[in-house]
Image: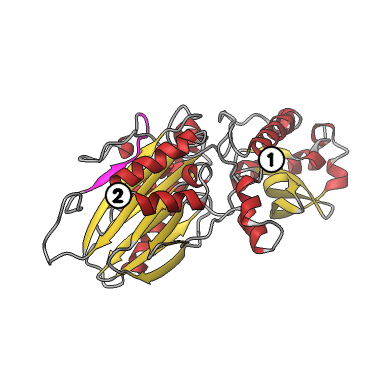
Amino acid sequence: MRVRVGARTDIGRSRDHNEDGYLVREPLFAVADGMGGHRGGEVASSVALESLEQLPKDSDGLLRALVDRIREANRMVLERGESDPELRGMGTTLTALVTQEQKAHVAHVGDSRAYLLRDGSLQQLTEDHSLVQRMVREGRLTPEQAGRHPQRSILTRALGVDAEVAVDELTLPLLAGDRLLLCTDGLTGMIDPDRIHEILESERDPQAASDLLVEEANGAGGDDNITVVVVDFEDAPSGVAGDGAVAAGTQRQAIAAGDPVGAKGAGAPSAEVTGVISAASTEEETEPEPAPRRRRWWRLVLWAVVVVVLVSGGLFAGRLYVRSQWYVGVAEGRVAIYRGIPTDVFGYELSGVEESTDLPAAEVLRLQPWQGLEDGITANGLEDARQVVEQIRRDLEEPA
């Protein structure tokens, strides 16, 4: 079966840099949408795609190998973020397709998507790992409402956030005439599925289809980076590759300024290159201050970020991945370490207790430096939160 591919990534109309990336290396195709600040998102998507490039072509268990590579990508993104304070909290989505004989294996984390166009019908193959998609599953929103919902940018799963990540996977038979689309939410957030269907159905050249999809998303506002990969499967005599067919070689688009991992792949199709996605936190990382000095101002900053993100649907920060946030607060009368943000969205708590302690909150609240404990004391990660707890313990044992 002959494979023809078109791909394009674009900065969009509202961003000043691109954190998206894509990979075209037959039989492997992928898109990634990074998050984590000006540089973090670019690095995260690039690291994930670089890891994916190590997928062995000749593996018998290709789907299992693909899932394993994505889990390895998760480890690499997480370790890179933990080793560099400027990249702390970064993450990325990843949606990948690998073909094997007459089958396509798809693996997926995040809210980038895979679609199948077959016999005039467009089917979404992946399910978004997002708060609004969870609400759709529970019948609290319709798909149409989810597409316009102000909380649509809150992810529930991404690479680079937890040590372990669940990877969705599926296998489908390939038929001549099938067209597969991989895309980031910069496309699906701007164009409804019916219009995507029309473009994929009417524009038969995969590169022209990719270009038109990006142009339409920009024409609708271009609120985010936009990345698409269109893969066509056609009958062809063995060994024959027509115009546009992908042969050996790699096309990888993902740039991280000043970072060798983000180098542009050689021979890539014409595209406006840069990265994808958005920031898990808009605050600059700084050296941790002593705990008593950071208990008041952070909450105002955090709420400002939350309000802007929720109201604008992510236009300011692009993404808010709540699990990259940490704070020390009160749970069941004891001091506790929380992961997330101390608020809820329509009944969904955006934080949870990660570690409990034996420190009585009532006694701690009597200490002047810690009177803001009930509102939460921000931390720059789990280890920093533990240091805050130890400082509280020392102050409790030896009050000033």
Which residue occupies 73% across, 38% down? 377
Please provide the residue range marked out in magenta.
250-257
Secondary structure beneath disc 1? Answer: helix
The answer to whether the residue labelled 1 contacts the one labelled 2, judged by CB atoms less than 8 Å apart, is: no
Residue 256: in magenta span: yes
267 or 62, nearer to the observer: 267
Relative placement, left or right, of 232 versus 355 is left
Secondary structure beneath disc 2? Answer: helix
Q: Which residue is denoted by mark 2 in the rendering?
A: 206
Whole-percent x and y of residue 135? Answer: 67, 58
Residue 310: in magenta span: no
Which residue occupies 31% across, 72% down? 61
Label 1, label 2: how far apart the Cα atoms are: 54 Å
On screen, residue 203 above or below 43: below
The disc, 1 or 2, on the residue closer to the chain's N-terminal end is: 2
Whole-percent x and y of residue 381? Answer: 59, 43
Q: Which residue is denoted by mark 1 in the rendering?
A: 388
18 or 284, nearer to the observer: 18
Which residue occupies 31% across, 48% down? 23
- Disc 1 residue type (three-letter): Val
Label 2: how many Cα within 10 Å (few below 14, some 14–19, many 20+): many
257 or 22, nearer to the observer: 22
Whole-percent x and y of residue 161? Answer: 53, 50
Quarter of the image with the N terminus in it: bottom left
- Disc 2 residue type (three-letter): Pro
